Image (cartoon, rainbow, N blue to C red):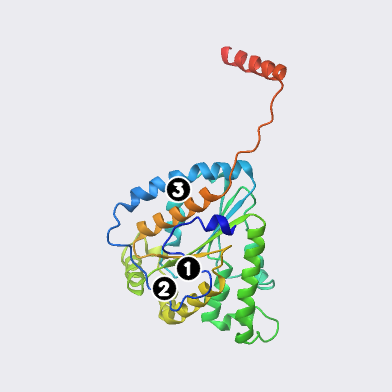
């Protein structure tokens, strides 16, 4: 998969060698970017031929992982980027707080059950990365994941990063294209969106006091994000840290990264089985008679 991912030209790709030195601070779109809604529409249409070949050929699968803080725009990205695609081979899995059953398994189990088949595009709205983000910020959550005391932090986090890297490398070796997106929203824009949800009756249902309280841990999340990006952005499963303050720029950039990656895959329609001439003639005659009747 590495050679296909290398074809992606994006300023938002995270270094693949763990050299990120500080939490990403790119929150806004370049000043010269205009009409991102039109660019998004054009890019969506450009993805469709690749989607059809992916489904017809069934040689590859695509896994798209979306992670972000609250109010960064994950739901809007998923809605707008995939609006023009045929839903027949697009599967969305949203992961909330783990259930008791899920907690009785290893942390990769619940997402592994939702992985896309060959020919499918799988979309993860949150993912196993919650286990090195939210759980790292709130280590008390580990108490529900182990029968006894959880492992020491110095041992636990390196083991989880290693498990994720090996999991994703295994998927890539099995012809899964993995693209991971961190939607990078600024504290100011996040607060503005919380207020919009509070003040707008049509968006009030999305407002959560828990989300506001969680935003107080921004410094801790920034540190956890930097560790996550450094430890798990690899040539076979790169991260893209995309500015999220401008929603339409964010959506277009993500769509364009997906377009470039899918265009690089050697997607082909399957070979067509030739129908013997006498059978083709018979079938044609039958169908034409139905049309005439």
Q: Position of residue 47 (x, y in %)?
A: 48, 46
Residue beneath the point at 56% across and 83% down = 139
Mark 1 and mark 3: Cα distance apart in space: 27 Å
* Residue 120 circle label: none
Circle 3 residue = 83
Quadrant of residue 122 within the rendered picture: bottom right
Mark 2 and mark 1: Cα distance apart in space: 9 Å
Other-residue count near label 3 (Cα within 10 Å), few / some / many at <14 / 14–19 / ≥20? few
Q: Is residue 77 left or right of residue 267?
A: left
**Label 2: element kind:** loop
Residue beneath the point at 49% across and 76% down = 19
Residue beneath the point at 38% across and 73% down = 25
Mark 1 or mark 3: which is in front? 1
Q: Nearer the viewer, residue 92 or 101?
A: 92
Circle 1 residue = 14
Other-residue count near label 2 (Cα within 10 Å), few / some / many at <14 / 14–19 / ≥20? some
Q: Earlier in the sequence, mark 2 or mark 1?
A: 1
Mark 2 and mark 3: Cα distance apart in space: 29 Å
Q: Earlier in the sequence, mark 1 or mark 3?
A: 1
Q: Quadrant of the C terminus?
A: top right
Q: Nearer the viewer, residue 289 or 38?
A: 38
Q: Is residue 99 visible?
A: no
**Label 3: element kind:** loop
Circle 2 residue = 24
Q: Is residue 14 left or right of residue 158?
A: left
Q: Is the Cβ of the residue at disc 2 closer than 8 Å to that at disc 1?
A: yes
Mark 2 or mark 1: which is in front? 1
């Amino acid at each position: 998969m590495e050679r296909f991912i290398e074809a992606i030209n994006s300023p938002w790709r995270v270094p693949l060698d763990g050299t990120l030195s500080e939490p990403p601070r790119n929150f806004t779109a370049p000043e010269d970017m205009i009409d991102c809604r039109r660019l998004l529409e054009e890019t969506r249409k450009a993805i469709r031929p690749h989607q059809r070949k992916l489904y017809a050929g069934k040689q590859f699968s695509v896994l798209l992982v979306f992670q972000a803080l609250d109010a960064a725009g994950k739901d809007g990205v998923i809605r707008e980027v995939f609006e023009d695609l045929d839903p027949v081979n697009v599967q969305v899995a949203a992961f909330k707080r783990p259930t008791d059953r899920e907690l009785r398994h290893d942390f990769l189990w619940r997402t592994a059950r939702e992985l896309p088949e060959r020919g499918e595009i799988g979309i993860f709205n949150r993912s196993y990365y919650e286990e090195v983000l939210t759980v790292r910020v709130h280590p008390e959550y580990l108490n529900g994941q182990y029968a006894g005391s959880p492992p020491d932090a110095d041992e636990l986090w390196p083991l989880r990063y290693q498990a994720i890297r090996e999991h994703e490398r295994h998927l890539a070796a099995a012809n899964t294209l993995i693209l991971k997106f961190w939607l990078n929203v600024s504290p100011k824009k996040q607060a503005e969106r919380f207020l919009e949800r509070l003040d707008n009756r049509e968006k009030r249902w999305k407002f959560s006091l828990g989300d506001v309280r969680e935003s107080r841990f921004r410094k801790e999340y920034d540190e956890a994000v930097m560790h996550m990006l450094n430890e798990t952005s690899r040539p076979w499963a790169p991260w893209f840290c995309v500015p999220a303050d401008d929603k339409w720029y964010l959506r277009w950039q993500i769509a364009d990264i997906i377009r470039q990656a899918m265009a690089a895959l050697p997607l082909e329609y399957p070979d067509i089985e030739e129908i013997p001439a006498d059978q083709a003639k018979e079938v044609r005659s039958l169908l034409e008679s139905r049309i005439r009747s």
